[in-house]
Amino acid sequence: MSEIGPILRALLRNKTSALLIAGQCALTLAIVVNALFIIVARQELMQRPTGLDGENIVYVQSMGFTRDFRPEAVIREDLDLLRRLPGVVAASPINAIPLSGGGSSRGYSKEENTESEGIGAAYYELDEQGQKALGLNLTAGRWFRPEDVQALPENTDQYPYQAVISQAMARKLYGEDAPLGKRLYFQNGQRSVAIIGVVEHLPSAWVHAENFPYSVVYPRITTEKFIRYALRTEPGRRDELMPVVEQALRKANAGRIIRLRTQSEASARSYRGDKAMNIILASVSGLIVVITALGIVGLATFSVRRRTRQIGTRRALGASQWQVLRYFLVENWLLTTIGVLLGSGLAVALNLYLVETYSLERLNLWYLPAAAVLLWLLGWAAVYAPARRASRISPATATRNI
Amino acid sequence: MLSMHNISKVFRTDLVQTHALRDFSLEVAAGEFVAVTGPSGSGKTTFLNIAGLLENFDGGSYRLDGVDVAGLSDSALARLRNEKIGFIFQSFNLIPDLNLFDNVDVPLRYRGFSAAERKQRIEEALEKVGLGARMKHLPSQLSGGQQQRAAIARALAGSPRFLLADEPTGNLDSLMARQVMELLEQLHEEGTTIVMVTHDAELARRAPRNIHVLDGAVSDLHVVGTPSLRAATV
Amino acid sequence: MFAYYLRLSLASLRRHPALSALMVLAIAIGIGVCMTTLTVHTLMSSDPIPWKSDKLFAVRLDSWGPDRPWEEPNEPPPELNWRDATALMASDIPPRHAAMFKSMFTVQNEDPGFAPYMVEARITHKDFFALFDTPFLHGGGWGDSADKNLEQVVVLGKVANDKLFGGENSVGRTIRLDEREFKVVGVLADWQPVPKFYDVNNGNFDAAEDIYLPWGTAQPFQLRTAGNTNGWKPENIDSFDAFLNSESVWIQFWAELPDTETKARYQAFLDAYVGEQKKLGRFPRPLNNRLSDVNQFMSERHVVGDDNRVLVGLSFLFLAVCLINMVGLLLAKFLGKAPELALRRALGASQWQIVQLNLVEVGLVGLLGGVLGLGLAYGGLEAVKTLYASNDGNDVRLYALNLPLALQAMAIALAASLLAGLYPALKVGRLAPAGLLKTQ
Ligand SMILES: Nc1ncnc2c1ncn2[C@@H]1O[C@H](COP(=O)(O)OP(=O)(O)OP(=O)(O)O)[C@@H](O)[C@H]1O
Ligand SMILES: [Mg+2]
């Protein structure tokens, strides 16, 4: 590396060009690091466990419109029909679709008659087949029995007696204490239900809310014109069964509009923005890397072209091909290193701004050395072809007149 | 035509100061043909650059055609250069991407002539140097002598009154050099003032007036012959 | 002279085709990315009703619970409850005002064989149409009495009229909503404000509802909102009337206040009303009634998402990288041309003329980059559309280039490349010609 001295002096004579490459590398690093950081965070968000048998769940929404629509009877008939369909594992009425963005929530606490609003959690209404219909994993206690389930109209004073809650909810409320048998209070601690079971995961409807993992399930069916069922099919048979289900229900009762939605569709819709953001960020990062690499290629090509005679002279004076190649690699390394140093500072500054303005997470500093290595490799990859061309310049060029 | 008094020019680099010209004084009358000789590094090119308004100087005064050039703006200098001065370089300095027509066109464009006038002047100039048939050729398709003649065509297309040549024959063999020299002499006869730097003693002797530059100053100036005398010897 | 510069520049670009392509591409990609995000951003943050957005006010009362505000630092809830909405409608200070909410129906036409479908409807007061200058194709709105008493009349949106009546003038005909008959009194032309400013609770860029019902239908038919219902108070809601009397908020309210004097009077009216209600034990929070005009309201309700802002910022950083890239390449390129430029100076070009020549070349690169960038932006928007597009497809209009945006793109491309070219152009223009001629 005895060449660093002369290379550095040569660079200093072309300060502007050197600074431009270094600056471009710095900005590239700052942008890519921050984009990558956001991408990874979103990816983690989207991959949180749901506890649902996501690929095999279909929701059926039925909107009755005839004046003589009898919800209670229709629900009984529909469930009967759905449960008998071959390929359907289980079916249950359900009030809201997990991860869909639409649902109901309420504040819960472990104390009676409290002033505080407690913690917000989604509440679901399911019947005795609800656990099987969503594919939930029960970790303690039991699920509802048929005799626990109440069918009630929407506006009512009556509340169920029992509830199953998610493990995250249990931990949030009771810490390490066993939640079974405890009472769960709501409406400022004026009402309560008994906790009879805990499921490993059951997320709320709101994927971006803090209360995402908290949920409470009641053994209840709301008897209104708008009815929703969750049903789970045998693995892989969801798409094939959907038209069958729709046909069967339509035939059973024509006075309504039927709509089907899969769990995957509902989740994808909620995460659509995050997924789109990630794709855009990844594409922009990719483009920026390509642009920077091409820029380095262009500048190196210029610099080789300008120095053709000089390189020929050096070769005539005894420099080996490898020495010429090394000159360019070292020069490029110096520039990217300045870029890395500037860029690391810039990346942290950009992240601080994002933290400040958009309450993003603090940057994990391990991203910086990783990006530095990436940038060095990128620089070399970009400069290799022009440098190789330079190293092949014939020593005869020195004497030729151009 | 050209009147320099005590011109000095210093090149400063980090470590050294080079006095390229010191107390350089010279008068060139209109219609003269002056050959400048001198050892390498003596300041000939520097003098020519200053004379051609390509470089400014540090001290002294310079009047070109009665105009004091000190303190003129860049665009005024450009205008003077364009209207009064023609340049001929040792390495021709033709623009490789332009054909002869377009090369000769360059100074005329900056002069702001109409398209018709430019065309006429270009054709005349190229005819004059014997390249009328080569207008569409690129410089790379010509011999060295032809290139230099094209460069001369370019220099005279704007009919400048003052022609500056820095070793115009330096890159040419003696036959070609003689051709170029004859062309310059013809121009001189037509009334153009010429200052030519050369290392070729024989060529220098053909010029009516010789000056010798040494260490950035005119060392001796002797007249080899008056214009009328010279005319008699040819 | 310009034509001459243009010819020289074209030749110069042709001399190094790969390099020129690289510069054009850098600008094009920068512009493409910027225009993509900027288009979405501009349309998201566009004023949906520019001619009167400063006179239309979202009305909010802070009826929220004592413990904490609806949203930090001290935002009142975005909607009203039934009682307060009814009370505000009694005021005659605003020349026009309307309460409103969204509901769902199944809809059929007169033909018994028509397959019913679900439709979103807006239940509102008669002023809605004049308040927002909705364009009518046929007929008009309803009268005051339909807001006070039950009158089964509707105004159809364009799509509903197309679906139910094949686009004919349906005024005077009937449709069935949940098996109840309604008479059509008006049909709207296509009206889709972006964003859907008067109700951003469920989707900022959702389609406008397709059917409008008078306020007088809400109570008799017990129409429930299909939007959000938010409450803070533990109340025993066991009937529709109990719901109407609860503190649950679910109604949007808009008023037109033509001048500051009217606005001040209306604000005083709101404060007086809330003061009175406080005496009855309602409104536990400090007085915090808010009148926000359309644009204020859009910003208070965060209509332009953080992600979008981050992307716009990012894409401008990206453009900066593309520009730095271009500055470097141009500098190298112009320095390579320096001997030729020096020769031009020797032949009589002034510094300024050299700079001009360089800038023409740079401008050419910018122009080419801008045109290509527009193409890329078009592709980018198509891609973004498929990434984001929602089911109702209304937000598709967020991803469409229009002429002003295209011109803006060209302007940015030109300005950006001239900016990038300025330094190299000046630097090379200033080089002393003498030195460069010698090195040849
Ligand atoms: N740009 C410059 N910077 C520093 N020194 C310079 C520069 N140009 C010329 N010089 C110095 O000025 C002196 C005169 O140079 P000049 O080019 O005028 O010589 P010359 O007489 O034309 O020589 P030659 O016959 O070799 O062309 C030399 O010593 C040279 O080193
Ligand atoms: Mg010289």
Image (tube, coloured by chain):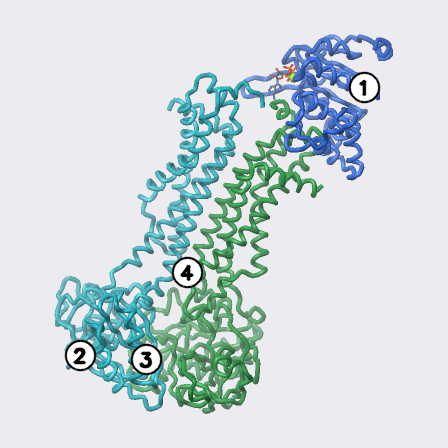
Chain colours: A cyan, B blue, C green
Disc 3 is placed on an element classified as: strand
Residue that carries the numbered disc 3 in the rendered image: A62
* Quadrant in which residue A207 is drawn: bottom left
Disc 2 is placed on an element classified as: loop
- The chain to which mark 4 is attached is C
Disc 1 is placed on an element classified as: helix
Q: Position of residue A141 (x, y in %)?
A: 12, 70
* Quadrant in which residue B134 is drawn: top right
* Both labels 4 and 2 in a single chain: no
Note whether C160 is above or below C352 in the view shown.
below
Residue at mark 3 to residue at mark 4: CA–CA distance = 29 Å
Q: Residue C387: which numbered mark, if any?
A: 4
| Residue nearest the observer in this picture, B67 or A65 | A65
| Residue nearest the observer in this picture, B133 or C281 | B133
Residue at mark 3 to residue at mark 1: CA–CA distance = 105 Å
Image quarter where the N terminus of chain B lies is top right
Q: Residue A161: which numbered mark, if any?
A: 2
Residue that carries the numbered disc 1 in the rendered image: B186
| Residue nearest the observer in this picture, C329 or B147 | B147
Residue at mark 2 to residue at mark 1: CA–CA distance = 120 Å
Q: Position of residue A247 (x, y in %)?
A: 31, 79
Say which residue appears at 53% left-offset and 54% top-offset: C375
Image quarter where the C terminus of chain B lies is top right
Q: Position of residue A321 (x, y in %)?
A: 42, 23
- The chain to which mark 3 is attached is A
First along the sequence among labels 3 and 2: 3
